[in-house]
Image: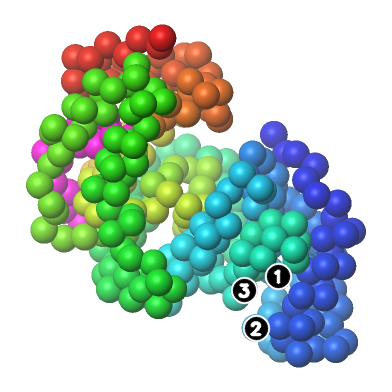
Amino acid sequence: MKESGPDVEQISARLLSYLGMELGATELTYSSPLTQILGGYDAFTYQFCLGGTGEKLSKPLILRLYGEQRNPETVIRESAVQNALSAQGYLALAVFFASTDLNILGGAFMIMSHMDGAMMIDTEREHIPRMLGEAHATLHRIDTTTLIQMLAAQGIPAAQFSLDARLQWLDSQRLDIPWMEESIQWLIDNQPPKPRQLSICHGDFHPINILVSNGKVTAVLDWPGFMIDDAAIDVAATMILVQVVADHLMPEADFGESMPQYLDSYKGIRTLDERYLDYYRMLRCVPAIIEGAEGRGAWSIEPIFRSLIDTVFEISKIKVVLR
């Protein structure tokens, strides 16, 4: 559901002042006013056009403004991954400005290119598995070197976005969630070997985060959960998002039944080591259960929450019992 967000007029004036200083443009104006298009738990999204600037920035732009609950440094990491992918021809939106200064707009923010298209979820259902698989495999084929270098330039080690780092974070949560300790220990004890090839993983790759126009993917959105690790981590996450979340929220669509088509399309472009998919499905379920128990997002919806618990039992034979 779209939330109202900060006062648009106030944000509009502050944004124009900020851009004027950044661009050294004294006569900067809006040729199309700042208009909210999306709003939610942790970010609000606006579109606008500028007048009195160069050609590159005279095209439609997007402002993504984050709430107080989001770590401001996330903006720097997201802009790095989007620009690294955009520079290599992938369908991530190029970021022109990123700031962690909360005094400018009241939250960290990014200003990036706008891309036409409708959410993949709203397109013809029979084409979704193919487009989803092809776009995902194409992402995983991209060399990680550029992204690793861009993160290093910001003083951010790529190791922060590895499976090891994810497991360390889960391990640090044990004292607060003793009812998940057995599941976390299972993930630590059964960690797969390091992959031969690292891939850029989106972390939340599903049809709502992908734009499509005329039967082609035009943009992949929302990168805060990205990793640099085994591509199978990302595929397994998509399987959980589609088979657990989408199947409960949109049962008439039978998205879970489309997984074989998605995997076939993926493997038509890139090979996939499927030996550890169950482990990585478990890896996605455990933090989702933690978030669901805290009442966060779709994970807290009762049938979705129960499906996550059932999946953990199916894979590990561990019964998650909330205390």
Percent coordinates x, y for residue 288 in the rendering: 41, 29
Residue underneath mark 1: 60
Contact between labelled residues 2 and 3, with CB atoms less than 8 Å apart = no
User: Residue at the location (50% across, 14% down)?
Assistant: 302
Let me know if residue 223 appears in the view.
Answer: yes
Q: Determine the CA span between mark 1 and mark 2.
A: 9 Å
User: Residue at the location (28% across, 68% down)?
Assistant: 144
Mark whose residue sits in front, 3 or 1: 3
Amino acid of disc 2: Lys
Q: Classify residue 219 as left or right of residue 190.
A: right
Amino acid of disc 1: Pro
Nearest the viewer among 243 and 72 is 72
**Residue 271 shown in magenta:** yes
Residue underneath mark 2: 56
Q: Determine the CA span between mark 3 and mark 2.
A: 13 Å
Identify the image quadrant of residue 17. bottom right
Percent coordinates x, y for residue 81 in the rendering: 43, 65
Percent coordinates x, y for residue 320 in the rendering: 32, 14
Residue underneath mark 3: 97
Mark whose residue sits in front, 3 or 2: 3
Contact between labelled residues 1 and 3, with CB atoms less than 8 Å apart = no
Helix, strand or loop at mark 3: strand
Q: Earlier in the sequence, mark 3 or mark 1?
A: 1
- Which region is colored magenta? 268-286
Up the image or down, 166 lies above or below 287; here it is: below
Coloring scheme used:
rainbow
